[in-house]
Image (tube, rainbow, N blue to C red):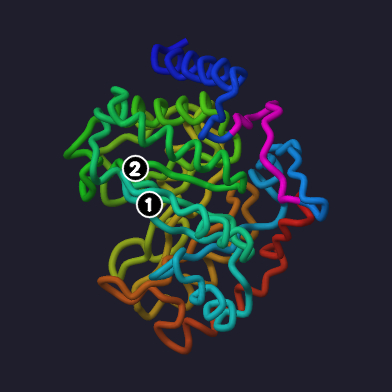
Amino acid sequence: MKATALARTLAALLTGILCLAGCVSSGPAPIGAGGNGAQPAATGPGGGASYVPAQPYDVTPLLHPKAKYFGATFDGVPKDLSPVARYASQVGRTPTMLEYYLGWGDELQTDQTEAVWENGQLPYIAWEPHKATLAQIADGSQDAYIVSTARTLRALNVPVAMSLAHEMNGAWYPWGTKGATAAQFVKAWRHVHDVFQDEGVSTVIWVWSPNIINPVPQVALKPYYPGDGYVDWIGVVGYYARTGAQDFQTLFGPTFRQIRTFTQRPFLLAETGAQPNPRKSAQITELLKTVATRSDVVGFIWFDLNKETDWRVDSSPETLAAFRTAARNHRYDLDFDALK
């Protein structure tokens, strides 16, 4: 057992002894996979509070459902979920996955995350370590924050997809190739995963999220891969620009092929979109059709923002019409209730 895990275990044992002596623990009861933790039930009509077992949400049916995730991200979410309804009205289908970003050191807002799930979307949290280096994350000096986040998610008990330090193979983020090595990335990823596991968190779908290799062909992806024991989905990030790759196979194919040399984990298009260009409607149609028909792709997340350029599906009436038509595909009829 790692020293940090041993320390947490001893602390938990001491807390249990104190509680038997009459103290009340301020932390949530441990409820990991196979655990029997309990959460206080609401006071009933008779005024007596009771304790009921709280089984952790089983994410297994969500890992590779027959239907596809129809995802998106918008400005202002998850604090403001009104863009989800607006988008659903525009495109004729309600998203089943919603991506948003969590800055390192920021507290995960449980009410907002729960609201996303209750709204019908699987929360996808892109965890961005702007305020800590990967080396600091790996060496345990950030454990107080990691443990706090893990316990928050454990107590929340809703399914969450989560990436850490996305696009690590690029040079545009501080945790990328200019600020960290592949070995540091892997060590940091595994450490965070191990802390979550030690804390009994079983409701997270772990998404390893590299950028497509087209702009960085010299950076091999395999050294960045933490291993199948630490990853559930491969969340590829790739966008159609006005120049360069103009179809699905040219944009994503080289990255998919390289990744398939070291893992068979399913793909998710964790961020995608298209700049305004004469082929945008065709690109939308092809992307949604390809995701719907490929058995190794679980879904996509459309970056529906006007940021630096207009990636939105309604950048023109023609592109919106193309998206509405493609979104009718029955393969996107994902029903969470049917997966339980």
Q: Give the residue number, with chain letter if any, for mark 1.
A: 102
Disc 2 element: loop
**Between 68 and 161, the one nearer to me in the picture:** 161
Query: Residue 209, located in which quarter of the rendered image?
Result: top left
Disc 1 element: strand
Q: Give the vertical position of 288 relative to 28 (above or below).
A: below
309 is within the stretch colored magenta: no
**Range of residues picked out in magenta:** 29-43
Query: Residue 179, located in which quarter of the rendered image?
Result: top left
Q: Which residue is drawn at 45% across and 19% down?
A: 8
Label number found at residue 165: 2
**Between 194 and 43, the one nearer to me in the picture:** 43
Q: Which residue is drawn at 36% across and 31% down?
A: 144
Q: Can residue 291 be seen in this view?
A: no
Number of other residues with Cα within 10 Å of mark 1, as a class: few under 14, some 14 to 19, many 20 or more: some
Q: Residue 328 at what x, y percent from top left?
A: 67, 74
Q: Give the vertical position of 278 relative to 307 (above or below).
A: below
Number of other residues with Cα within 10 Å of mark 2, as a class: few under 14, some 14 to 19, many 20 or more: many
Of labels 1 and 2, earlier in sequence is 1
**Between 307 and 295, the one nearer to me in the picture:** 307
